[in-house]
Amino acid sequence: MVSVSGDTPFPHRPRNLTIRELGIDDLAPVFHLGEELFTSDRYPSLYRIWDEWEVTRLFNTEPEYCLVAENEGVLAGFVLGTVIVKASWTYGYITWLGVNPQFQRQGIADMLVDRLIERTIAEGARMILVDTDPTNTPAINFFKRKGFGNERKHVFLSLNLTKHDYYSKLIAYERDRSDRRP
Ligand SMILES: CC(C)(COP(=O)(O)OP(=O)(O)OC[C@H]1O[C@@H](n2cnc3c(N)ncnc32)[C@H](O)[C@@H]1OP(=O)(O)O)[C@@H](O)C(=O)NCCC(=O)NCCS
């Protein structure tokens, strides 16, 4: 557990802030804070939809990269990350980062990301990745301020299968088949 002292570029950072690993009792508060923050206007792509499995999956598989910030018993923020090992390079990945609106712009995300990066470096990471919606100005400003760059645009496309000539027939066929099952 890391305790925060006064020498910080964020003078309003809460004095009693602690950063620690996510515990079992944090699962519901983290999930609910995420529900408040990760709304569909910020994350329109379906595969990035926040749900309770995101929290429990990362807690089960990579608890060392699941950190929370707490101030006097109140959840101030969280970061959930991972490490990706490729043949030539190891990457840290910031999967989810969220700060309670009451605590924003006080340097809490800054601390959470620092602690996560330290942990990924200990596992061999030499590059840290993150992605977000291009309209998410607070997050983009935050990451740029932290030194992230080499920004690339990523395009999501979708196809409504129910309106497609062939796939709509396949959907009807499958529905029919399951209706006929005893
Ligand atoms: C992005 C987010 C995590 C930043 O958390 P934070 O604790 O407020 O950030 P910090 O206090 O450590 O850093 C503050 C810096 O971030 C940027 N920033 C934060 N909020 C901002 C806002 N509303 N508008 C513009 N820039 C903002 C600025 O660069 C700011 O520095 P400044 O205050 O000197 O201008 C927070 O706004 C949040 O939880 N957003 C919703 C969830 C989200 O988008 N997560 C990121 C993708 S997973």
Image (cartoon, rainbow, N blue to C red):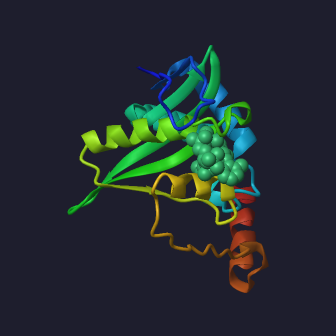
In this rendering, position of residue 79 left or right of residue 118: right
| Residue drawn at 48 percent across, 23 percent down | 4
Image coordinates of residue 159 in percent, x first then y, are 69, 76
Query: Is 180 or 155 nearer to us in this picture?
Result: 155
| Residue placed most toward the observer, 156 or 160 | 156
Q: Residue furthest left?
A: 88
Tell me the residue at 45%/43% (across/down).
81
64 and 168: which one is in front? 64
- In this orientation, does residue 57 appear? no
Residue 73: give x, y in percent of width and height: 63, 14
Q: Is residue 144 above or below residue 18?
A: below
Say which quarter of the image contains residue 37.
Answer: top right
Whole-percent x and y of residue 35?
Answer: 72, 40
Left or right: where 176 falls relative to 114: right
Q: Is residue 148 above or below residue 156?
A: above
Count of numbered circles in the view = 0
Nearest the viewer among 142 and 47 is 142
**At x 26% / y 59%, what residue is drawn?**
86
